[in-house]
Amino acid sequence: MGCFTFVKLMMVLFNLLTFLGGLTLLAMGTWVSVDGGSFLHHLGPFSSQGLQFINVAFFCIAIGGVLVLLGLLGCCGAHKESKCLLLTFFSIILIIFLAEVAAGVVVLAYSSFAEGILRVWAIPALQRDYGSDPVVTKIWNTTMIELQCCGFSNYSDFVGSQFEKENGSSLPPSCCWTNSLPCSLAEAERSTVQGCFEQILELLKEHANTVGGIATGTGVLEIAAMIVSMYLYCHLDNRVS
């Protein structure tokens, strides 16, 4: 088996797996969009962790559609030795790779502004909507319970809030180490529970290596796919000549 035949076979098999994975995600996304309640039920204990606020269906359908397209282009391009399909496959991978690099640069450049941007949204939401808006209340309660934190910066985010006024100057239970009601302002001050933003930063730092590894692995696979598709494309040129 020659080098070209081997690379062609690997290209077909890899993209066939990509195509099947995309179909699986499309089927899952369709199931979620049609019967989301059943999907959350099958998640068991995770269904109560705020997953209902994430539109899983659209995410699965979008990613699945991209994978199906890429798998189909790569598989057919390699099998039929089509220069047009191989070039289209290469171009799409290149666009995705450049978009990921650009997104990474933007994240690094604006990470120092993340706290200010989040603060503009989070604190007004805590002041106005916590306790009255069920969606906002659910999200913040889940976050504060899971991360054992209080507010965005600390308990002071609830001082003067609508929730405090309606509950006799009491703060959410998560703002006191005892996690009991009522959680008074004095008790919250003594407890010194960390704000959720600090906890989220610590959580991100703990998983930074994992995220970086996944990003690096994805980038390597994309570069490998571009190299292989371009190798086949150029080899076809040589064969024609």
Image (spheres, grey):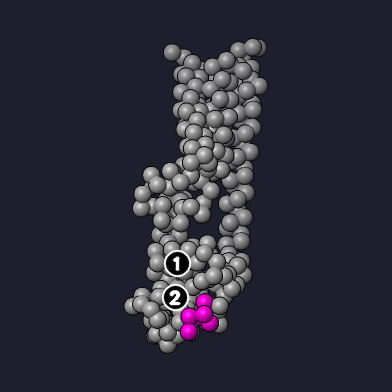
**Residue 226 x/y as whole percent:** 57, 31
Q: In the image, what residue type sits under mark 1?
A: Asn
Choose top left, top right, bottom left or bottom right for residue 208: bottom left
Question: Label 2 sits on what residue type?
Answer: Pro
- The reply to whether residue 88 is in sight is yes
The vertical placement of 48 against 224, above or below, is below
Mark before the other along the chain sequence, 2 or 1: 1
Asked if 23 appears above or below 103 in the picture, the reply is above
User: Is label 1 in a helix, a strand or a loop?
Assistant: helix
User: Do labels 2 and 1 touch, CB within 8 Å?
Assistant: yes
Q: Residue at the spot x=56%, y=78% of the render?
A: 162
164 horizontally vs 146: left or right: right
The image position of residue 177, as x and y in percent, is: 35, 77
- Which disc, if any, is residue 54? none
Residue 200 is situated, as x and y percent measured from the top left of the image, at 46, 64
- Would you say 44 lies left or right of 74 here? left
| Image quarter hosting the C terminus | top right
Residue assigned mark 2: 172
Q: Which residue is mark 1?
A: 141
- Residue 173 found in image quarter: bottom left
| Point 50% across, 66% down: residue | 137
Residues in magenta, as a range: 163-168
